[in-house]
Amino acid sequence: MTASTLDLINGLPDGVWRPCPRCAALLHSDRVVRALHTCPECGHHLPLRAEDRIALLVDPDSFVEHDADLAPADPLEFTDRIPYPERLARAQARTGRADGAVLGLATIGGHRVALVVLDFAFLGGSMGSVVGEKVARAAETALDHAVPLIAVSASGGARMQEGVLSLLQMAKTSAAIRLLRDAGVPYLSVLTDPVYGGVAASFASLGDVIIAEEGARAGFAGPRVIEQTIRQPLPDGFQTARFLHEHGHVDLVVRRQELRGVLTRLVGFCADSALAGTPGTGSRVGTGARACPRDAGRDERRAPVAPDAWAAVARARAADRPTARQHIDQIFTDFVELHGDRWERDDPAIVGGLARLDGLPVVVVGHAKGRDTRENVANNFGMPHPAGYRKVMRLFGLAERWGVPVVTLVDTPGAYPGLAAEEGNQSAAIAETLALAAGLRTPVVAVITGEGGSGGALALAVADRLLIQENGIFSVISPEGCAAILFGDAGLAPVAARALRLRADDLHRLGVVDEIVPEPAGDPARSSALLAAAVGRLLRQLAAVPADELMAARYRRLRSYGVLAPGGTGTGRLDAESGTGTGRLDAEPWKEGAHV
């Protein structure tokens, strides 16, 4: 590692003591270096030079720098307190670099990546023509080599000394990231302290996954500018990593000591997700991943008599029923939870992220009820706001770009019906989620694990295959709501439940669900194993279907739902292959069987 960052910034020699800027503890420079430039007393994250950052993140001796000699010009002949060329010369002498970004190829956890790191020590990491060019070249390098891009940002924003040419780097870098999105090449953005202005409003905010280092500050306008412009007092913690996480702007907040491990997991996930093909040509469910175990549950015996409908409602709502988080813990491995809608907040009623199903990379998304009253209140009882559905859409889009299948876990009374939700346009959020799911170019398997309530549940239930656990329910409205509206008495909910045909067996007979997954009584581990086997089997089947065929079949599936009166074109689902009416509710030639 190079000389300590504090020494470079403060002009102090090695081996000296200095106070921590946060807690004022007296720290020796050697101890600071051993702690990865964090304060061993309070954890405050100190600035890092680009070369130190690279050494921290990549495998030893794996980084090969590109375009180190790219140097800035002085297109405006700009002078503030000193001429721009003189300012550049001073920064170059101080840092030993031609400009404020370092670009190259490296490996992280044995996987190749393209890497670009901004150095705040060079004119505050400001983005001029060279920085913008290096970011664009980094994206193009990732595209050419079909490897993930990692950008580590630390910047005060656009470089004013290059005027509008600096401003246009925002468009240049964003366009380069768009190329990665279109090609399905993963992009991981790391925010370090600080990230403002043109960098924050371009490539730094476009990551498929955005990670903020603990203590980082980021935003479009800095606090001082905001206070001076609109004379508005700002809350404590404004624009800090935790603030960004709370408001849905970043996926993860990690300490510096954890950053390499998190990136290693993400890069490994990206590498495995790309094993099966080329973006846009077919479903890329990783054929190189280990196969899911054979599902012994195919012959599992279910109870011979289905419960009464009202009893089924009680079972689906039972307080001890496994939550989405518990299912994820039992069924998947290597789960990395991602947060936020990148708009206004992170909705805890939706849980989702990257995971593996017996080695197979997937994106998993579910309604997050709680295990007790406190957790239910915190999660709004699994009833999403519009931000929750925008979060779902973001995760769906990530799955499509990275070419991995989606698994959804449905368990909600419905979308949240309140003032804030209406102000946030709940209807449009659900509608956009439905439209996006209908056209995803990657396999989708949905499971109703508990209560499937109305459109709030349907938003996560548009899929190539829809499963339901034995004790799950799915309905257009709650029995209480139906009874109140149609019968004029909410106390008649048991009668409404029977009329709604919301049990698993009813739904299978109607052709709504493809399979019923047994739930052996008193054996949650077995139930989880059966669910994992069923989902894994279906994902293997769908992996062989090219994307265009997958989308066409999904549309035919959605198009087929409904029952017409005699004399119409059919009384059941449309035939999955021909699109013609079969007149039979059970006419579903793509099914393998009634039950798992």
Image (cartoon, rainbow, N blue to C red):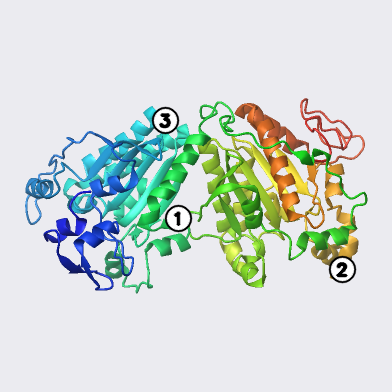
Q: Is residue 208 visible?
A: no
Disc number lying in front (3 or 2): 3
**Which of 485/20 is in front?**
20
Name the kind of residue labelled 1 in the image: Leu
**Which of 20/278 is in front?**
20
The quarter holding residue 67 reads: top left
The answer to whether residue 167 is above or below residue 232 is: above
Name the kind of residue labelled 3 in the image: Ala
Going from N to C along the chain, the mark reached first, 1 or 3, is: 3
Rounded to the nearest angstrom, the CA distance separating label 3 from label 2 is: 61 Å
**Which of 276/504 is in front?**
276
Rounded to the nearest angstrom, the CA distance separating label 2 from label 1 is: 48 Å
Disc number lying in front (2 or 1): 1
Name the kind of residue labelled 2 in the image: Gly
**Which of 70/385 is in front?**
70
At a point 58% along the width and 56% down the height, the residue shown is: 388
Q: Residues within 10 Å of mark 2 (few under 14, many from 20)?
A: few
Instruction: Return the x and y of residue 83 as percentages of the image width and height.
Output: 7, 50
- Mark 3 lies on a secondary structure that is loop
The quarter holding residue 596 reads: top right
Q: Are marks 1 and 3 in contact (CB under 8 Å)?
A: no
- Residue 503 circle label: none
Left or right side of 231 for 246: right
Instruction: Return the x and y of residue 82 as percentages of the image width and height.
Output: 6, 53
- Mark 1 lies on a secondary structure that is strand
Going from N to C along the chain, the mark reached first, 2 or 1, is: 1
Rounded to the nearest angstrom, the CA distance separating label 1 from label 3 is: 25 Å
- Tag 3 residue: 146
Instruction: Return the x and y of residue 385 as percentages of the image width and height.
Output: 60, 60
Instruction: Return the x and y of residue 341 as percentages of the image width and height.
Output: 51, 54
- Residue 252 circle label: 1
